[in-house]
Amino acid sequence: MSTSQAQSLAYEVAAPAAPPKFPLDQWYVAGFAWELKDKPIGRTLLGQPVVLFRTADGRPAALEDRCCHRALPLSHGTLEAQGVRCGYHGLLFNGAGQCLEVPGQERIPTKARVPAYHVRERDRIIWIWFGSAEHREPTCEPPAYEVHSSGEYLYDGGVYHYQAPYQLIHDNLLDLSHLGYVHLRTIGGNASIHMNARMRVESDDSSVRVVRHMPGSVPPPTYTAAYPFRGKVDRWQEIEFRVTHLRIWTGAVDAGSESLDDPRRGGFHMRGFHGVTPETESTSHYFWTIATNPRSNPEETKAKVVEQTVMTFDEDKVVIEAQYRNMLAFGPRPLVDIHVDVGANRARRIIERLRQAS
Amino acid sequence: MSTSQAQSLAYEVAAPAAPPKFPLDQWYVAGFAWELKDKPIGRTLLGQPVVLFRTADGRPAALEDRCCHRALPLSHGTLEAQGVRCGYHGLLFNGAGQCLEVPGQERIPTKARVPAYHVRERDRIIWIWFGSAEHREPTCEPPAYEVHSSGEYLYDGGVYHYQAPYQLIHDNLLDLSHLGYVHLRTIGGNASIHMNARMRVESDDSSVRVVRHMPGSVPPPTYTAAYPFRGKVDRWQEIEFRVTHLRIWTGAVDAGSESLDDPRRGGFHMRGFHGVTPETESTSHYFWTIATNPRSNPEETKAKVVEQTVMTFDEDKVVIEAQYRNMLAFGPRPLVDIHVDVGANRARRIIERLRQAS
Amino acid sequence: MSTSQAQSLAYEVAAPAAPPKFPLDQWYVAGFAWELKDKPIGRTLLGQPVVLFRTADGRPAALEDRCCHRALPLSHGTLEAQGVRCGYHGLLFNGAGQCLEVPGQERIPTKARVPAYHVRERDRIIWIWFGSAEHREPTCEPPAYEVHSSGEYLYDGGVYHYQAPYQLIHDNLLDLSHLGYVHLRTIGGNASIHMNARMRVESDDSSVRVVRHMPGSVPPPTYTAAYPFRGKVDRWQEIEFRVTHLRIWTGAVDAGSESLDDPRRGGFHMRGFHGVTPETESTSHYFWTIATNPRSNPEETKAKVVEQTVMTFDEDKVVIEAQYRNMLAFGPRPLVDIHVDVGANRARRIIERLRQAS
């Protein structure tokens, strides 16, 4: 899709009211590479119904999910080499939203086209750019995520649909102190260890980093099953928040064997990717992968890690959706902040500033 | 029900705001004769909750579906020789809406009555008249549909409830070009034949007629199974739109044997009746029958035709409801017309004019 | 919970608009004693989401069902000796709403507390007091219901959730004439007997009493199975409406053996308790018990009485919810009163007067 096409097509999309509900000049996760197969996918992102598909050259495309003829979602259509064909009267559109064919007539009406969005595939993640009025064109490349492509890790992932605004998911991910209360049945362990672990919080204009080190810990069962630790371990938990996604990287080395501050440290790693994309103001998509580098029983260990991750995320979803329903029931009322909210509150300030700016 | 009763009872119904949402001076389909058995039927028609039943003399009756005592739907009640008895406190109403009995007291309050609607049974179809302020009384008889009563045809039918406004169903029925895309799995066949068949569209103040002839066609399997064709056939598709119902009559004769323009032509016929009645502004009832005149295996052929018709209508419902949800999601936005929309657009103009006039 | 705590905490609850939707200076049923076990219960009462639980001393407590930290319902939490611990970040609150612990920090923020409600357990019923601005403190004790604690009766009960306003349930309970139409399949019997039984209605500022005597009746099967009647019986039905609950006490003695006006009369008794508590303006909780004093096969008779009661209440629920949906569909429109509405109409006047006054 050429730049000029994307620009000229963009006029049909309603101009967002000021300030927009979400920071717009960002690459958001629209899906994973393995989701785009033989059928178009319909997904509402930042309030815009979008149809995602691959063209014959393998490149991802994203169009407004509405045939310009009679408004059927194009995601109800079928894929052909040239693009997506509407499932009602058969109009055919290419990845740039141009209508290539109107069955039953020779002439293609000038207005027969649908808006296209900028979309990129990088490291098995499909990214989409909506852009503010000033930045319809992306101002940067989408983020890399080498964990998916370096070959060092086994990973798997999925997508959750949340009946809750996306920032409540940020809050949850930026604060691992809830492990001891929400995840009693899975990875929770001792609540007070999680609540009282020393925590370092750093932030800048567009990111927040929360680091917790737990030296000399007893390694949890998943760790010992996956990696030949000799005894106690030095553990780390590192959370990096970006406006549209987070990394939660955890792991351990043999106690005293390496510096936890060395980014190239060895040991056992669990690396989580968390793309949190608003569907609407009150609902969200949560795209995740979990990657590990097990030395022993690699496939079995990966499967176990994924299974536990899913159980954990299921628990979070129950809590976050209940939290949101209750917020709606009570309406806007003051909340009390506590110590563990530092990271989440900084993330909220970043988003609020970007929202006002875009 | 005498005229004066219906008029005097009508005062309780809220006067519709101008212009009304639907053309009012029309006979709409309320149901089929065989639906009115031993229980009252509750059905909202043109925004009015109505209870339908038969009185002891076999005549259909239609009352506002609300007991005047404590507002329980009368359709929750039971039928007696004299009328319908409310299922809460037992008030009994006749087909004109008069209260005949109030259990526990001798005197029947003057105001104890419910509005009655004009209703007629003709050719196994139950028709209802709401009427504008000027035309509370029907200005004509309900339409005939001899296919149901001539004895020449075997037929069956049913009722769909649509989460979509009724005019989207008109659009669908007036344009058979969608067969090749929506009905791929059933009667679709070759899309380009359907899209490119020559089409004749005629219309007047209250009807639209779309005719397509396909001479020298290979007869489809259902046709050959039902009728002893000698080889190729001349096929026709005739759609007649009226404000409250459509006829879609299709069929074939041996190629070159008879004029397709002769209304008394022989051959194999499939005759569809389609009563489309608004339930509310955004939901609809779709009453249909399909009739055939098979020469071979009549009951088996009819059953097959009905089965395929149901599969086809199921497919339409999925598309039309998805279309409407998408229209709601995007709000009012321009659409692009193409060639096959001619018939549907004329039907929309007829309805808009009648709506403004009533 | 001390009085001063409840007062000081109350400020966070939004002041109700005048006039309130429900009489506020009343004890409403919040639940039954046996519901408060090892888990907190979340229940919206008079529009207020409330969490109910017992503290270690066995006393019931009721807090606003919203953690003051991040708004998760406290009913998603867990019970400890000291109170309820939030299921997200582990804040611990006692029965007065005081925060006793914030995991991860020493200091407890001054504002970390949740509003508490006055709650009492009496005769196995949990009562809650909301109170108007002038009467935050209860002005009386909650009602006694000795049937639950006297030891003379076997009883059981349950809770229904109604998609209907609570006054429609009052209407139903205050008028037993519907038995012959709604409860045809259970306790209905002959409709005209119920409709035409002589009825005495008395009322004062806060209660309505409806009494029906049916001397010399044939005892129904449940009665004869439970009690050694000698032949015909003198039956009574006594309904007492109070603003937040009703008693429906029925029974029979051997015909002519005792005065039905003697409150200490013997014979067979069925005593129903009906606590009707608004959940919201349009939904309700219906707490009920049914008690009997069978002489024969006590447990078996009780089980049969409870089973029939549940079937009867199921039928009422269908009717009342259909009635309410229809009222919404038709909007405010006049209704016609009949003879059997006397008791229900008096109850409505009492509630309207109290609502205006509080």
Image (tube, coloured by chain):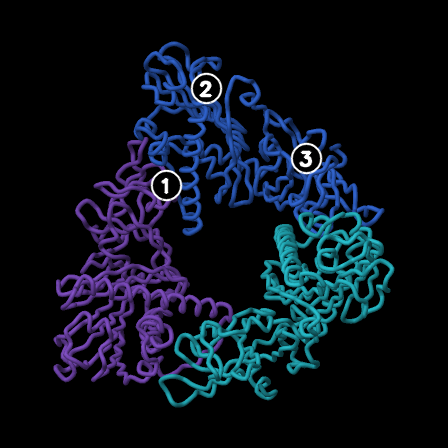
Chain colours: A purple, B blue, C cyan
Return the residue at label 3. Answer: B61
Name above or below for residue B147 compared with residue C15: above
Secondary structure at numbered mark 2: helix
Circle 2 packing at 10 Å, graded few (<14), some (14-19), many (20+), is some
Q: Quadrant of the N terminus of chain C?
A: bottom right
Return the residue at label 2. Answer: B298
Q: Mark 3 and mark 1: span between their CA atoms?
A: 43 Å
Label 2 close to label 1 by CB (< 8 Å)? no
Is residue B234 among what the camera can see? yes
Instruction: Give me the residue at 44% from left, 44% from top.
Output: B321
Circle 3 packing at 10 Å, graded few (<14), some (14-19), many (20+), is many
Secondary structure at numbered mark 1: loop
Task: Name the amino acid type tagged 3.
Answer: Ala
Nearer-the-camera pick, C83 or C24: C83
Secondary structure at numbered mark 3: strand
Task: Name the amino acid type tagged 1.
Answer: His
Q: Residue C278 location in percent, x, y? A: 62, 66
Label placed on residue C220: none
Q: Is residue B335 left or right of residue B15?
A: left
Return the residue at label 1. Answer: A69
Q: Mark 2 and mark 3: span between their CA atoms?
A: 35 Å
Is residue C328 among what the camera can see? no
Q: Residue A307 location in percent, x, y? A: 28, 63
